[in-house]
């Protein structure tokens, strides 16, 4: 039997965090949530996760800053960026920093499930 994959959802919008967390739990993932990049880093110090799903636009430590820190300290964690805007430079910067993939707001859950399925196949 496979160990359940764990996901940390990072978004400053409480409704988005809650809704996404509940949907992911129904799919069998172990889910934790953080309201910003700093809280996410605190949680990563305590618990290992397989994947971080992070909004890009957040106050304080934004998604790009969080991605940089995760990739330097936890290079084996998959990071999927959530974005509400289509700025090409943000995609390029995130990809160059090691983001695994992107999903767009409003999130189409079927699209996210496909991205997560690729990680499950890669991660075993």
Image: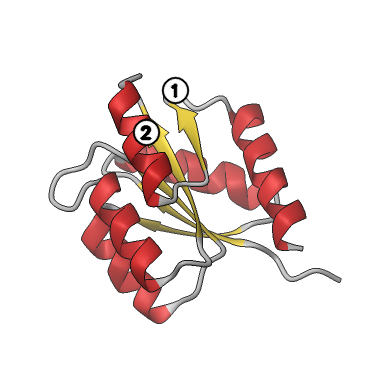
Instruction: Farthest residue to the bottom: give it.
Output: 46
If the image is split into quadrants, where does the C terminus sit?
Answer: bottom right
| Residue appearing at x 51%, y 63% in the figure | 77
Disc 2: which residue = 92
Q: Quadrant of the N terminus?
A: bottom right
Q: Is residue 11 left or right of residue 28?
A: left
Q: Earlier in the sequence, mark 2 or mark 1?
A: 2
Which one is nearer the viewer's eye here, 31 or 97?
97
The answer to whether residue 24 is above or below residue 109 is below
- Residue situated in front as seen by the camera: 105 or 118: 118
Q: Mark 2 Cα within 10 Å, few/some/many (few <14, many 20+)?
A: few
SS at mark 2?
A: helix
Q: Which numbered circle lies on residue 106?
A: 1
Instruction: Please state the horizontal and vertical placement of residue 99, each as a whole percent of the image.
Output: 45, 47
Residue drawn at the location 52% of the way across and 46% of the way down: 100
Query: Residue shown at 30%/21% (left/top)?
Result: 87
Figure check: 1 above or below 100: below
Q: State which quadrant residue 39 falls in.
A: bottom left
Q: Secondary structure at mark 1?
A: loop
Identity of the residue drawn at 24% across and 36% down: 57
How far is mark 2 from mark 1, CA to CA? 21 Å
Q: Of the residues tagged 2 and 1, which is closer to the observer?
A: 2
Q: How many marks?
A: 2
């Amino acid at each position: 039997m496979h160990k359940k994959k764990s996901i940390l959802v990072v978004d400053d919008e409480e409704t988005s965090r809650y809704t996404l967390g509940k949907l992911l739990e129904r799919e069998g993932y172990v889910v934790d949530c953080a309201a910003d990049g700093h809280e996410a880093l605190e949680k990563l110090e305590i618990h290992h996760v397989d994947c971080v799903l992070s909004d890009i636009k957040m106050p304080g430590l934004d998604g790009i800053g969080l991605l940089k820190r995760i990739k330097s300290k936890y290079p084996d964690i998959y990071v999927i960026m959530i974005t509400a805007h289509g700025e090409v430079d943000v995609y390029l910067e995130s990809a160059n920093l090691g983001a695994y993939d992107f999903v767009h707001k409003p999130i189409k859950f079927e699209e996210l499930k496909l991205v997560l399925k690729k990680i499950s196949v890669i991660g075993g």
